[in-house]
Image (tube, rainbow, N blue to C red):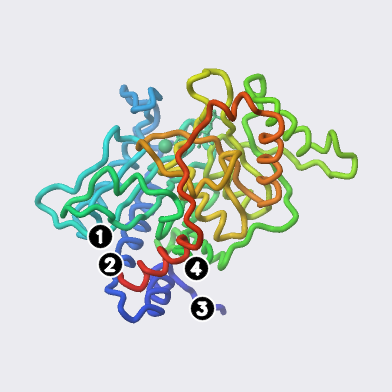
Amino acid sequence: MAPLITIERHIIDQQRKYPNATGAFSRLLYDIALSAKIIARESMRAGLVDILGSADTENVHGEKQQKLDIFADATMFHMNDHTGQLCVMASEEQDNIITIPDQFPCGKYVLVYDPLDGSSNIDVNIGMGTIFGIHRKITEGERGALEDCLQPGHDLVAAGYVIYGTSTMLVYSTGQGVHGFTLDPSLGEFLLSHENMRIPEKPLYYSANQGNQKYWTPGVRRYVDWLQGLDAPDHEPLQARYAGSLVSDFHRNLLRGGVYFYPGDLRNPNKPNGKLRLVYEAAPLAFLAEQAGGYASDGIGNILDIKPTSLHQRVPYFIGNRNLVEQAERFIQEYDPEWLARYKPMRVTVTGKRQTATMRVQAES
Ligand code: AHG
Ligand code: MN
Ligand code: MN
């Protein structure tokens, strides 16, 4: 029988590589894993207890919040507010940064999260997820500030997601490959099931909400034709799969190869940024994609090089096999001058910094 490797053991094994590590970073990852177990348990019971259905509140994006969103948000907060590892948090469900309550000590890490991704799927029993990213504190004060949350993805020290699907899995990376753990409900433990995940070289799927095609730019339309092999007889078509839950769509494409995209469009001339949020959706998964041999782009360049200017900033998104994502960039460059003239994110390209930031935090934590 192969030895069972729990997520705790895996984190400790990784920590051992850094003799000066204090364990603060490892404890933070445990706490996130524990939050995930609590959210998983509640999701499983969603059909049984009175937690189904919509709450009467709207979040900062004007979307109706589901009760499970609120539960997941509160769980992430309460499992991490008092531990002394974090100086500040940010969540999709909160307008502003989440400060650590005064009675608790602050640490040197920053946690950004989407507590429940794909929440429109709750009532129809389709997979959902939690996305998280961890940054290092960069501001001077004792408590964290907005600037700590507005760091580009290439300064992430770790990122991951939990998928609540046919089984619950936690997938994370600290910059040393991507590792997946499946929750064994009888043990209540995440067990290593997918070590060093790599996106397969031959992709199978493309994933996009094609119901929006009417609003797509000429470049994105041509891109879909290309994915379907319409303009290239020698190019086999990819199959279409779309769950409407970024975590589920990304997870499938990570295992099977493919591309997920949610492009910017010209529906509203002032908002050419698509739907997904940079800080706690796009950047953490981009970090994982790159660690798995893939790539994520806004249609112009690397998602990880975009400097967020606000907490809930949206970003056009293409993620998956590198060659598929780069092909989208080529079509956009060639056919979308109108869109390119309107979309101007702030970029900070720092060659080689990605690796250094991750290794530095491992060594010092
Ligand atoms: P959330 O549930 O956290 O608001 O995120 C929903 C996002 C993402 O998960 C998904 O890929 C996308 O919205 C789906 O959008 P459409 O319904 O417009 O396709
Ligand atoms: Mn989401
Ligand atoms: Mn969400």
Q: Residue at horizontal 34%, vertical 42%?
A: 72
**Circle on res. 176:** 4
Cα separation, mark 3 vs mark 1, equals 34 Å
Among the 4 quarters of the image, the one containing residue 117: top left
> Disc 2 vs disc 3: which is toward the camera?
2
Q: Tell me the crowding category of disc 3: few under 14, some 14 to 19, or many 20 or more residues within 10 angstroms, Cα based.
A: few
- Specify which label sits upstream in the sequence, 1 or 2: 2
Secondary structure category for the residue under label 3: loop
Callout 1 secondary element:
loop
Residue for badge 2: 24
Q: Quadrant of residue 346?
A: top left
Residue labelled with disc 3: 3
Asked whether 255 or 202 is in front, the reply is 202
In the depicted structure, whether residue 13 falls above or below residue 55: below
Q: Which residue in the protein does label 1 denote?
A: 108
| Dot in front, 3 or 1 | 1
Could you tell which of marks 1 and 4 lies nearer the N-terminus? 1
